[in-house]
Image: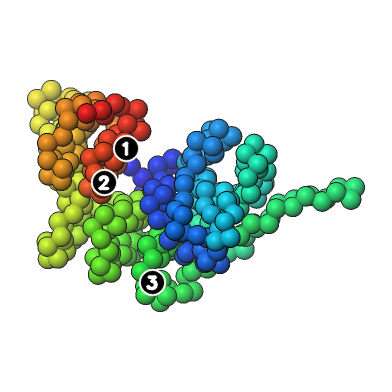
Amino acid sequence: MPSSSGQTDTDSPWKEILERYFAKFIEFFFPDMFLVIDWAKGHEFLDKELQQIFPDAATGRRTVDKLVKVWLKDGTEIWTVVHVEIQGKADPGFARRMYMYNYRLFDKHDRKIVSLAVLTDSRKNWRPDRFGYELCGCKVELIFPTAKLLDYGEHWDDLEKSDNPFSVVVMAHLKHLETRRDMDNRLKWKSSLVKMLYRRGYRREDILELFRFIDWILKLPEDMEERFSDEIYRYEEDMRMPYVTSVERQGMKKGQEIGMQRGQEIGMQRGQEIGMQQGALLTFREAVVNVLEARFGAIPKSVKNGIGLIDDPDLLKMLLGKAVVASSLKDFKEILGGTGLKANA
C-alpha cells in the first residue's frame, strides 16, 4: 500500500494509465505530436526491447518508462520513449538518462527515437529539456519535449472542462502537492475528484482505472480513508453505481474481522497479524473469482487455482481491478499469465 506521503517506490499506476490511454496521453501533453501520428495504424508497446537494454526501465523509484512504436501520417515508423518522473523532487541525472535511453535504443535497433518527458516535481524552475557536450569542435546534443505538471495549475478551469483522462491525473497530482501537510483538505479534494469521474459520464472501466490512480496519489491516514470510503460508498448508492470501491472496502473489513477472531483464539499479537493477512488474502481471492464468474460465467479450474496460489495482497487487488475491466476471460488469463502463473483452460 502507498505510504501516507502519497506514493510508493515501485508500485505506480502511471504504468497502467499510460498503457490504457496512450493516445490520450500524447493528445493531452504533446498535442503537436498527436496531430502527426497515424492513430488508425494503432500503436505497439515494446517493453521487451526496452528492458533488454534497461532491465529496471518498466517501473522504478524515480521514473516510469515506456517504449511505444507508432507511425506518422507520412508512413514513417518511429519509436517513442516516454519518461515520467514520479519521485516528486528534482533529479540532476534525469537529462543524462534521457540521452542514454535515446542513443542506446538507436544504436541497438537502428530506429528513429522520439524522447518525451513528464515532470511531476514541485520545483518550478527545474525544467530539464536537453543533454549534450561539446569538445574539440565535436558537439553532441539531445533536445526533448517536456511537460511540467506544475504548469497546469494556472489552467485549473480548463482541466475541469476537459474530458481527457489525463486532466484527472494532473488534477490529482496537483492536489497531492498542495495538500501534503493538510489531510483535511486532501480528503475534500479526493472525494471531489472521485465524484467528478461519475459526473463526467466516463465508462465504468475508466472510472475504476482513474479511481485507482486518485486513490494511490491522494493517500490518507487510516481514519480518513474510512471516512472517504463511506462517503464514496454512499455516493455510489445514490448514483446506483456500486463499483469495485465498495467491494475492496468490504473485503478489507472482512479480512480484519477474520484476523481479530484468529488473534483472540491464539491469544498472541502475531496470531492476529497472521489472521488479518490470511483473511484479506482469502477475501480478495474470492472477490476476483466472483467478479469473473459474474461477468463471464463459469471459469476454468486452472484460473481459480492460479488465483488461489497468490499470496500478495497488492497483486490480488490489481487482479480484482483487471477482472472488472477485462474485455474477455481470455484477456484476464493473459494478465494472470503475466504474473508467472499458468492460466490455461
Q: Is residue 36 left or right of residue 174?
A: right
Distance between mark 3 and mark 2 Cα atoms: 26 Å
The quadrant in which the N terminus is found is: top left
The residue that appears at 26% across and 54% down in the rendered structure is 205
On residue 335, which mark appears? 1
Check contact, mark 2 vs mark 1: CB within 8 A. Answer: yes
Element on which disc 1 rests: helix
Establish if 150 lies above or below 250: below
The residue that appears at 67% across and 47% down in the rendered structure is 99
The residue that disc 3 covers is 162
Check contact, mark 3 vs mark 1: CB within 8 A. Answer: no
The residue that disc 2 covers is 326
Regarding residue 60, the answer to whether it shows in the image is no
Disc 2: CA contacts within 10 A as few (<14), some (14-19) or many (>=20): some
Mark 2 residue type: Ala
Q: Earlier in the sequence, mark 2 or mark 1?
A: 2
Regarding residue 59, the answer to whether it shows in the image is yes
Residue 41 x %, y % = 46, 54
The residue that appears at 12% across and 36% down in the rendered structure is 298
Q: Nearer the viewer, mark 3 or mark 1?
A: 1
Q: Is residue 52 left or right of residue 242?
A: right
